[in-house]
Image (cartoon, helix red, strand yellow):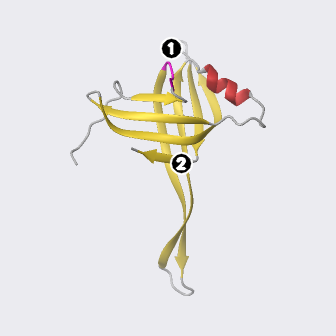
Amino acid sequence: MSESIISANVSSITVDGKTIPGLMSIEYKIVRNRQNIHHIGVDERIGVDYGPMFISGSMRVRSTYPPFDKKLLSSVTEKNSFQLVVELKKWGSTVKKLIFDDCYLEGKSFAMDANGVGVTDYSWTATRLREE
């Protein structure tokens, strides 16, 4: 497999099939709970035990994204999940497709300085990540 330099200006990110206007960046992290296994009387571990895995991330949007704001402010009894699809591209051709399933918004923060535009940072979690 050859090395691929993925370009942000040709890659695409959609939420439930719609492009987010003003999207500036996306970050995600995969965390798998891990616990060391030890023998009694031995300092070194003899193995590891893996537990649940979860995915967390954030998106920075110029100004705001009203569909996300609506999801955050809706009743907690409503299911407000979404699907996030990231197509990583090089020179216009897809290198990898990341599909985040069953995503939920966790929060948002908004910042604006005197010389710039407002920027909203949305934090989210996903149940699973599929790569194609």
In depth, the one of 129 and 72 nearer the eye is 129
Q: Main secondary structure of the magenta part?
A: loop
Q: What element carries label 2?
A: strand
Total marks drawn? 2
Residue 121 x, y percent position in the rendering: 57, 29
Q: Which residue is drawn at 25% across and 28% down?
A: 91
Q: Which amino acid does label 1 sit on?
A: Gly
Identify whether 33 is placed above or below 18: below
Q: Is 125 in the magenta?
A: no
Most distant residue in the bottom direction = 41
Q: Position of residue 24 (x, y in %)?
A: 46, 25
Question: How far is mark 1 from mark 2, CA to CA?
Answer: 35 Å
Residue range (magenta): 18-22
Which residue in the structure is indicated by mark 1? Answer: 116
Tell me the residue that label 2 is attached to: 128
Residue at 52 percent across and 14 percent down: it is 117
Tell me where residue 107 sits by quadrant.
Answer: top right
Q: Which of marks 1 and 2 is nearer the N terminus?
A: 1
Query: Quadrant location of the C terminus?
Result: top left
Mark 1 packing: few (<14 Cα in 10 Å), some, or many (20+)? few
Whether 19 is among the magenta residues is: yes
Between label 1 and label 2, give the one nearer the viewer.
Answer: 2
Residue at image location 54% in from the left, 79% down from the top: 38
- Looking at this view, name the residue that lies furthest to the top: 115
Q: Are marks 1 and 2 in contact (CB under 8 Å)?
A: no
